[in-house]
Image (spheres, helix red, strand yellow):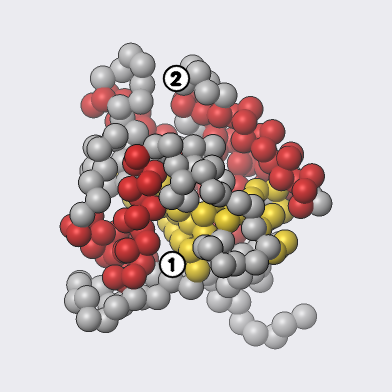
Amino acid sequence: MSTQPFTPGHLMVIGAHAGDAENMAGAIVLKHTQAGHRATIVHMTLGEAGHPTLPPAVYAQQRQREVQDSARLMGAEVVWLPYPDGNLPVNEAVKLEVCDLIRQHRPTAILTHWKGSIHKDHTATHDIVREAIFFAALPAVQRAWPAHTVRQIYFPENWEDMDGWRADIYLDASAVWDDYLAVLRSHALMAGGVSSFRYLDYYNALGTVRGCVGGFAKATAIMLPPGGWVRKLEYLPGLEPR
């Protein structure tokens, strides 16, 4: 047994819309917060334009409540930014705002969307995060917070981001799976009744499929940046338990 003192790591998940971070990375967050690490969930938009009947302003209020509830269930902090659903801008101001969040929270690793997405906000988020990580590490980019280097970026599995995505890591999520489903159910979008897409069925079944390949009862799959190697892990590097 290691005699080294436990140093908590910090996961940051950056999703395009309320619900994206939860469905693609909720099990990953739970696995690591329950092991004593910190997590911060960042929503670039609230996904307020996605309800078939509610006005965006009303649905935005519901989504704020939902992201707070799901963050509590995951043991995570939550931040949402004021950008419009469906029209997330990709410019220096947004990249620097995310850079500031990275510098303020100092995550060990960041999880976000893969670029091969059918949704323009997901692709925009990918591009914003990659450049924000670059800016955050440069001392020459002077902001209110000191420079911070993110140890690793990962791309968890999202049903809308599958063009060119691959499973490089199979992470055992068996022990947190029921908690993960509770996180999904805390969002009306994923519990059912808002969208015709069966989010809960999809991600629950996906956990079984990835578990079959990874050798676990339930698993979640993660992509490394291009050039990485396939790994089978209990915890993400730098985020091991006590």
Instruction: Give the labeled residue for mark 1.
Output: 107
Residue 23 lies, in percent from the top left, at: 53, 40
Image quadrant of residue 93?
bottom left
- Please name the amino acid that badge 1 sits on: Pro
Residue in the foreground of this view, choosing between 104 and 139: 139
Q: Earlier in the sequence, mark 2 or mark 1?
A: 1
Residue 180 lies, in percent from the top left, at: 61, 41
Q: Is residue 146 left or right of residue 105?
A: left
The residue at 47%/25% (across/down) is: 188
Q: Quadrant of the C terminus?
A: bottom right
Q: Is residue 82 left or right of residue 176?
A: left
The residue at 38%/46% (across/down) is: 123
Q: Secondary structure at mark 2?
A: loop
> As displayed, is residue 170 above or below residue 138?
above
Disc sitting over residue 147 in the figure: none
Residue in the foreground of this view, choosing between 206 and 242: 206
Q: Is residue 22 left or right of residue 56?
A: right
- Please name the amino acid that badge 2 sits on: Val
How crowded pointer 1 is (Cα within 10 Å; few <14, some 14-19, many 20+) is rated as: many
Image quadrant of residue 185?
top right
Instruction: Give the labeled residue for mark 2.
Output: 194
Residue 63 lies, in percent from the top left, at: 36, 32
What distance separates the C-alpha of mark 2 from that of mark 1? 33 Å
The residue at 56%/46% (across/down) is: 157
Image quadrant of residue 50?
top left
The residue at 43%/37% (across/down) is: 118
Q: Is residue 147 visible from the viewing direction of this image?
A: yes
Q: Is residue 97 visible from the viewing direction of this image?
A: no
> As displayed, is residue 115 above or below residue 181?
below
